[in-house]
Image (tube, rainbow, N blue to C red):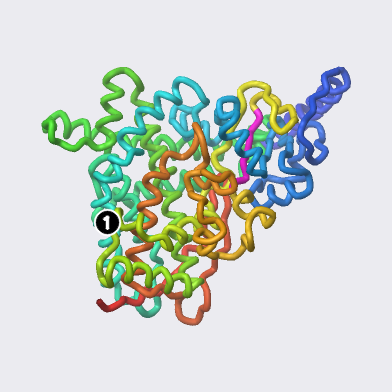
Amino acid sequence: MDLVLVEKALLGLFAAVTLAIVVSKLSGKKLKLPPGPLPVPIFGNWLQVGDDLNHRNLASLAKKFGDILLLRMGQRNLVVVSSPDHAREVLHTQGVEFGSRTRNVVFDIFTGKGQDMVFTVYGEHWRKMRRIMTVPFFTNKVVQQYRYGWEDEAASVVEDVRKNPKSATEGVVIRRRLQLMMYNNMYRIMFDRRFESEDDPLFMKLRALNNERSRLAQSFEYNYGDFIPILRPFLRGYLKICKDVKDVRLNLFKNYFVQERKKLSSTKPMDNAGLKCAIDHILDAEKKGEINEDNVLYIVENINVAAIETTLWSIEWGIAELVNHPEVQRKLREELDTVLGRGNQITEPDTHKLPYLQAVIKETLRLRMAIPLLVPHMNLHDAKLGGYEIPAESKILVNAWWLANNPAQWKNPDQFRPERFLEEESKVEANGNDFRFIPFGVGRRSCPGIILALPILGITLGRLVQNFELLPPPGMEKLDTSEKGGQFSLHILKHYTVVAKPREF
């Protein structure tokens, strides 16, 4: 059976190559396309570039071909943008033209072909989904309502680390406890629910499914079938696994969370003083006919991935950098003790009066950007960019990591030095006021989660530094900060062990 499939694929490939050559000879239209490596029929640049289109590899190509370059990955045109000016053009000046989303064969499965908010095309559905999600998730009112919960969760992390006898000696893999914290932070907002421990069976099932979804979606393994449709039959097994994981996840969201909330609201109607959680607002929109049940579940899917994991990665990077730079950790602790008073635990309003803490957060987001290429953009129609013509439905990658780590734009960018945001870059903020630093994107398709991520980062890092001296495990001078990149993500390769020596107050 496999030999027959291979034979058919090769025959199809030969026919397609022949057709492509004939078409290219007959076609008289010449577009002024961005520069890039010379493509070959069918495969384009895939054989030269490979599957691993990570931020560092794309930065190397930009050095060779320029700030706008074109890669032909099989049937897909991929445009890589690597300068602040061109990033401004894509994200702001021509935000409508480049405001759509390209997906791939795997993300089509996990998002129901764009029934969510993050990966839907630019248009009425996106506007509706963004509006429905903004009120219950992404406003200052939400921050003020839920910040006490975030502070409680951070306090619980501190308490559990203190109680663990290994913490102060051989160390603990602190990510595991922080992951529970992040799930509780977001599930409080979404469903007014929390998990009591890492051993909670429902939490364990949810975490396992989300981890598998993330692994399958972020892998580069399926690119060949996404780029070259003729090779897609070889992805059948992979895509079936993706579909099975998607079905189980959505059923879990529906049966254990959405339906439970529906039952609760029907048996215990809230009075006017009751606090609605996010799913209540979203279910109201479903009742009004603005969205359907699938849209509700895909909103939950977006939050599980986009809000929980990305913030967790940034916290994990921040702790690693503080451990590996004890002078930065010491300076941050001194600021916390001086401004708040030794032993007075940081709260959300305090984060705004701690400039060095803010600088540490910004430097973590600069050097270790969780989504280094942002979420890809797409132009639905032919467009122009930087004097070049961009064919319709091109995938546009803005290398935000390179914008923030280009030596031509930043002094010693490979160094973790928060002081830069107090000195030469003192006016640069994470909200995109400077296109050299856009960790959350800018414009219509920017990440609205910035309003939640920044205070959670501040509270969590602040509490840990206040209460512990964070050190590498015995026998190690530094933590391993090797990177693991994915389709969009950048997280730490190994979930490290950290020693947390309690401070006495």
Q: Where is residue 8 in the image (x, y as percent from the top left)?
A: 73, 29
Indicate the quadrant where residue 358 lies.
bottom left
Answer with the quarter of the image where residue 37 lies: top right
* Circle 1 residue: 151
Secondary element under disc 1, as helix, strand or loop, is helix
Left or right: 290 with respect to 412?
Answer: left
**Start-end of magenta stretch:** 394-400
Mark 1 is on which residue type? Glu
Pick the residue in front: 52 or 372. Answer: 372
Q: Residue at x 38, y 65 (%)?
A: 174
Question: Looking at this view, is 277 or 459 the one in front?
Answer: 459
Rendered view: 118 above or below 205: above
Q: Would you identify the image quadrant in which residue 51 lies?
A: top right
Q: Residue at x 46, y 47 (%)?
A: 212
| Residue 287 picture location, percent across and down | 27, 21
- Is residue 449 something one can see in this rendering? yes
Number of marks drawn: 1
Q: Nearer the viewer, residue 9 or 85?
A: 85
* Percent of width and height locating residue 158: 29, 66
Quick check: 142 above or below 24?
below
Residue lying at 29% horizontally and 66% vertically, measured from the top left: 340
- In this rendered view, identify the residue nearer to me: 341 or 482: 341
- Is residue 139 covered in magenta? no
Image location of residue 504, percent across then percent down: 27, 78
Image quadrant for the N terminus?
A: top right
Residue 4 in sight: no
